[in-house]
Structures are given as structure tokens and as C-alpha cells.
Image (tube, helix red, strand yellow):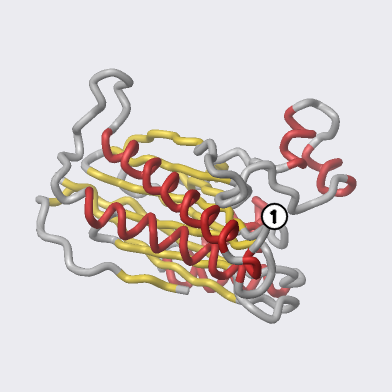
């Protein structure tokens, strides 16, 4: 048995940037959603985020079909499909790092990444950097990832409250990203698939422009139609200034269905 997912994704250049360095992938049959926010300037940032989403997607396409959703590693107890996702992210990191080491024009490029992968009645969330994953349960919105950023470290250490950090701390300084070093630590989280729950994956172009409360109200109001909700979130980000590219993927957990052969997935920019 597999959990069904309803997935939509939108990515917008915003009002200030000339190019879109974000990349996304959604594959409902595979149960996969990925958002990546590239850095390093035009072409380099766009390349880094594209390498990330394509590598993760293709690695899972190849490895997941032969793996039972309930398989767990005998030593760690972790879900095997979660381990596969982590390995796919590790491979993406290596490929980006090797590219920027080899090609002068891409030096310094990297990307954040946020992923959700659902199999059977479980899902795993993985992230590196400050792209986020939120969960809407009923009308309560919870951020289920913790930014790998300087601002978050200052908050965690008690130097600032979240409100003070938003006013005083430098933004967009991530402490982890794919491609900067030859290895990277991926933060993983396992959850139960609860029918009716909604997940939002986004680049910081959304949450820098739109408050968590505005996000919550938008999802509650337009959540019956995920595409409308995604469009509303992108619109709010642009109306708030649109200082960065903004990418939004919405995922609603459905019921359980019998497993079937998976058709080709869909990639969105």
C-alpha cells in the first residue's frame, strides 16, 4: 500500500532578480517533492539547483521501485527509503562540488535543498540550508525544519529573539549548503502520513516576504485548491517586495492505495 499525494509546484523570478536560480521537482507517483535555491550568481546558482533536483530525482527513480516501503536498516532502524534520499542528496553535493572545483566560472556555487519523500504510510523530510518545510495540521501551521543559517544560530544561542533577529541580523547567510564542501550534513526527519495534512516546501523568497501567519491564513483559505493556494503565496511574496526568486511546492496527504507501476514524473521550474 502507498500513500497518495496531491502535489503542485510554482517557481517565480520575483520583482528584483533578473533570473530564476531556484529549481523544483514534483513526482506524485514517486511521492517526491524537492525545492532548491541556488547561489553563486546567474548560471552558477541556476546550475547548482538544477544539478541538485535532477540528481535527487534520477537517483530515486532508479533505486526506489525495488524497495519495499517498510524496509528499515537493521542497525540504525532508519527507513531504507530515507537512507536512499540522504544518499541521493550526498551525491548531488559531490557533483556540485566537483563541478565548481573543475569549472572556473562556477566557483563558489551552491544550493540549499528541502525534500519530502512519502512511501507506504511514512514520509521523510530532508533539508540543507534555509529552504523550509512547513506542515498544516487542521488550522495550525508548524515549521518542521530548522534553518541552517546565521540568524537561526543566533536565535538558538539566545542572542536574539526571532523578532529581533529579523530586524538586526544579516539575512541569507547559510551555514550549510550543497556543493560548498566535498561532504555535507543532511538533517533528516521521519513522520507518519496523516491523511488531510498539508506540507509546504519553499525557498526563502517566500518566508522572507510573507509571515508565517500570512502563510497559515492563505493555506487555510485556499487549501481546498492547492494550485490557487500556491498562486496566492507567490502573489503575496511579490506584493511584499519580491526581493528574491520564490518557489512553492504544496503537498496534501491522501489515503492509501494499492501500489502500481509509476509513469514518468514531472519537473517544474
Q: Residue furthest bottom?
A: 18
Residue located 71% across and 58% down the image: 208
Is residue 268 visible in the rendered image? The answer is yes
In this rendering, position of residue 73 left or right of residue 111: left
Residue 197 at x, y = what percent? 39, 47
Give the structural element (helix, strand or loop) at label 1: loop
> In the picture, which quadrant includes the N terminus?
top left
Given residues 122 and 58, the one toward you in this image is 58
**Count of marks overlaid on the render:** 1
Is residue 192 shown left or right of residue 174?
left
Query: In which image quadrant can residue 107 be found?
Result: bottom right
Residue 98: horizontal and vertical position, in percent? Answer: 52, 55
- Please provide percent x and percent y for residue 35: 49, 59
Q: Nearer the viewer, residue 106 or 43?
A: 106
Judge by depth and name the residue closer to the eye, 245 or 193: 245
Which residue is located at x 69 percent, y 81 percent?
18
The answer to whether any part of residue 193 appears in the image is: no
Residue visible at 27% across and 67% down?
Answer: 265
- Mark 1 surroundings within 10 Å by alpha-carbon count, few (fewer than 14), some (14 through 19), many (20 or more): some
Q: Which residue is mark 1?
A: 211
**Position of 146 compared to 149: left or right?**
left
| Residue 105 placement, left or right of 117 | right
**Which quadrant of the figure has residue 22?**
bottom right
Amino acid at each position: 500500500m502507498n500513500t497518495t499525494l496531491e502535489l503542485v509546484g510554482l517557481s517565480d523570478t520575483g520583482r528584483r532578480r533578473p533570473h530564476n536560480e531556484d529549481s523544483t521537482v514534483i513526482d506524485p507517483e514517486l511521492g517526491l517533492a524537492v525545492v532548491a535555491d541556488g547561489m553563486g550568481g546567474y548560471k552558477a546558482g541556476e546550475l547548482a539547483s538544477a544539478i541538485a533536483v535532477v540528481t535527487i530525482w534520477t537517483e530515486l527513480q532508479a533505486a526506489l521501485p525495488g524497495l519495499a516501503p517498510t524496509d528499515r536498516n537493521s542497525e540504525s532502524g532508519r527507513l531504507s527509503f530515507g537512507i536512499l534520499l540522504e544518499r541521493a542528496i550526498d551525491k548531488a553535493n559531490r557533483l556540485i562540488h566537483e563541478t565548481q572545483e573543475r569549472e572556473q566560472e562556477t566557483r563558489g556555487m551552491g544550493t540549499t535543498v528541502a525534500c519530502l519523500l512519502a512511501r507506504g504510510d511514512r514520509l521523510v523530510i530532508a533539508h540543507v540550508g534555509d529552504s523550509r518545510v512547513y506542515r498544516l495540521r487542521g488550522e495550525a501551521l508548524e515549521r518542521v525544519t530548522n534553518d541552517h543559517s546565521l540568524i537561526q544560530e543566533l536565535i538558538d544561542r539566545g542572542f536574539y529573539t526571532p523578532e529581533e533577529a529579523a530586524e538586526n541580523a544579516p539575512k541569507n547567510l547559510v551555514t550549510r549548503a550543497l556543493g560548498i564542501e566535498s561532504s555535507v550534513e543532511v538533517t533528516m526527519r521521519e513522520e507518519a502520513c496523516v491523511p488531510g495534512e498539508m506540507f509546504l516546501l519553499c525557498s526563502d523568497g517566500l518566508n522572507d516576504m510573507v509571515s508565517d501567519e500570512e502563510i497559515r491564513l492563505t493555506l487555510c483559505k485556499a487549501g481546498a485548491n492547492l494550485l490557487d493556494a500556491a498562486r496566492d503565496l507567490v502573489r503575496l511574496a511579490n506584493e511584499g517586495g519580491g526581493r528574491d526568486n520564490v518557489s512553492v511546492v504544496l503537498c496534501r496527504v491522501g489515503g492509501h492505495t494499492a501500489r502500481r507501476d509509476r509513469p514518468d514524473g514531472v519537473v517544474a521550474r
